[in-house]
Structure formats: structure tokens, C-alpha cells
Image: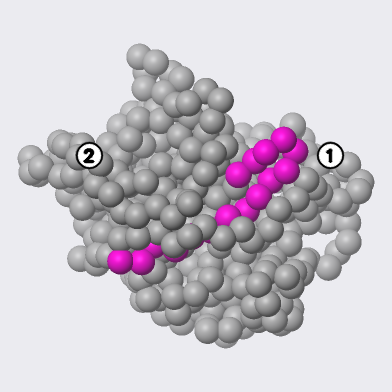
Amino acid sequence: MRYLTLSLLFFLTLSCTSNKKQTVKDFSSPSGDNASLPRLFTDNTGTVFMSWVETKNDTSSLFYASLINGEWSEPEMIRESDSWFVNWADYPSIIAQDGKAMAAHWLKKVEGGTYAYNVEVASALNNWENTTTPHKDNTPTEHGFVSLVPASDSTFMSIWLDGRNTGSESSHDDHGSGSGISSAMTLRSAMLDADLNLLNESEIDNSVCDCCGTSVTRTKNGFIAAYRNRTENEIRDIYVSRFLNGEWSDPVPVHNDNWEIAACPVNGPSVVANNETVAVAWYTGANETAKVKIALSTDEGKSFGEAITIDNGNPLGRVDIEFLEDNTLLVSWMERNMEDRSKADFMAKKLSLAGKTLKEFTLSEMASSRRSGFPQLSGYNGSIIAAWTDLSEVENSRIKTVILE
């Protein structure tokens, strides 16, 4: 039986800037063996959903479970296949509404090349049997790095990186280096309903970084998408676009880091909103210096304040950000262990809306390799739940989860 209840196994006492004791509570995750790529999502009722992938031979299986009253539900398999494209940075997700799973996505290989695959979205209605592809270009190119968010009880917004203009030039091997803006990856969106009817599809930006993750969230009056842009001069900074009154606004930079890099760093941003307050966290390597930064907006993302650097000097990026109930922020990232570069610390800082560090936590030590993926944060019961891929067992990856109090 894979039903796993909340069990407080041990406490890690952590130092913080206020010199108070803080605890990270470790508890069993619902995943099985050879599990990786967790995605967390907290819905409008406060119910936490987690999806993950389990692999056996050449078959990938997408599972999910929900966390209610301190207990994980029995894991449910959404779908399994031997024809998916599953990547350490580009992997499935789940969203939910009203305490119930709503939609999930994965990437399905298509004929035409190693890096030809489509986005497939499934609805929880009819037991995940119904699927659709939100893009209708039918090109054998890359489509991925999807972000989903509910728009209502029966509709949801999706955004993704779209390779319809790239032909066969772009791949995960070259990360878009030297392919030219005319054939660049684009950022597109679509609204879908619970029956997977495509309500609209539109282009947000016609030139974006080839393989950095995207992020989208609801604001008071619409949505805001954050992603890594790409200019003609190969400046790849973080941009946002706002969806208001049925249209996406012209993309604008969150901050001009002026990071010139003729390749994709595989390090996307994270955006969250609380009514009209919007916060974006991101990684940059501008001026040959790695940094993790945040910037805040008080006008629903129309403009942002000065960028604030929050890392401890050796960040790998892989950021996430969440609002806490006391109207503060928790930002997470991976910080490289300089004594053993195969390891990294999963770090988090609690910040005021003025950008002041209130507390700092080490959530866990983890592998610095790509296989460890992107650690996750999500709201839970007034605090935060975190999840990541643990590689401490050489032959068996597992999902680890903790609650930060």
C-alpha cells in the first residue's frame, strides 16, 4: 500500500538572521521508486497537489497525490507512455481548483527529429482520458516548458515555448546558439476549458530563450507571464507580459541585467502575485557573475522596483518564490557547495515586501547535478511545503518533501 501519512521523523534546527530557532519538518512523500521531477500546486482551497514521474525501463508514468489534513492521498496514475519526452528541466505538471485536480500536461515525441515533440494537456474530467494539443501548427519542432494556471472553475491558462519557427535548427544540444532571431523560439498561450476546447491561442513574444522555464500566475485583473527573452544582440534577461481584457501586453524587462549569452542557460524565472502585488525571482550570469535576484511590483506588474540580490555568492539558480500568509515572501534557490561541487544547498530566504531579509533557511543538502532538477515551493496550511529529487541512493531517485514552519 502506497498510502503515506504525515509522520514527523526529525527536526533540523536552522540558524536565521533573527537568531530564533526555526524548524524544517521532514515527512514521507507519496512517490515510489525511481521517482523524480516533482511539481507542487496549491489550489484556491489550500489543498496541495504534487505530480511526479516514475520510470521503469523505457516507460514513464505520471502520478499525482493531494495533501489534506496532514495526509497524502493514495497516488493516482494519470498516464504512462514510452513515447514521452522527459527532461530534467522540462517536465510534467498538474493544476487544481476547488480541492480537485483540474488539468495536467506532458510532452509527447512526434516524428521529425530527436527534439520534435508536442505539448499534451489532459483534463481530470473523464478520468484523464481526454487530451489535446494547445498549439495547432503541426510542425515537428520543440514545444515545451509549459506553465498552467486556473482561470476559473472551468477554464485555465496555458503558456509554452513554441518552436514552429525554428525548423530543425534548434535543439537541446546547442540551446539555440547562433540560430538567428528570425527562427527563434516563441512564447505562446492558449485558454482552454475543462472539456479541452481551445478558447484562444496567441503569441506573447516572437523571440525568447530556447530552454528556460516559464512561469504564469493570476493577478487581481488578469494574468502575468514571466520568461527569459532573447534580443538580436543575444541579451537574455527576464521579461513579463500582462494578460488584461483578453490581450497580452507588449513584453517588458523586469530588470536590465544585460546578460549577453549566445546559448540558453536553462534557468527560468518564477512569478507570484497577491492581488496587485507581483514578485519575480530569477537567475542571471551578467558580467560573468552568478546572482539570484528578485524584484517587486505594486501595480500588477506594470512596473517593477529595483532588483535585489539575495544569494550567498555561489548560486546555481533554479529559483522558486511564494507569498506567505503574513504578506511576506519566501524565495528558494540552489547554492553550490564550494568544498564539494557535486553538492548544493537548497536555500530559502523570507523577505519583507521592502526586500529586507527576515530569515534564512537551509532546507536540505542535495546533488548539484541536472538530475536533481528544480526544487519546488508551494503554500501549505499557512506555511510552505517544499519538494525536490533526492539522488542519495545511487540506483534509486526519490522525492523528498518537507514543511517549513
Query: Residue flagged by tag 2: what amino acid is it?
Result: Phe
Q: Is disc 2 in contact with disc 1, using a CB cutoff of under 8 Å?
A: no
Q: Residue at x 35, y 30 (%)?
A: 365
Mark carried by residue 71: none
Dot 1 crowding, Cα within 10 Å, few <14, some 14–19, many 20+: some
In reply to whether residue 59 is colored magenta, the answer given is yes
Residue 106 in the image, given as x and y percentages of width and height: 68, 56
Circle 2 is placed at which residue position?
A: 10
Question: Which is in the foreground here, disc 2 or disc 1?
Answer: 2
Q: SS at mark 1?
A: loop
Residue bounds of the magenta highlight: 54-69
Task: Answer with left or right where residue 139 lies relative to residue 233.
Answer: right
- Rounded to the nearest angstrom, the CA distance separating label 2 from label 1 is 44 Å
Residue 267 in the image, given as x and y percentages of width and height: 54, 41
Circle 1 is placed at which residue position?
A: 114
In reply to whether residue 278 is colored magenta, the answer given is no
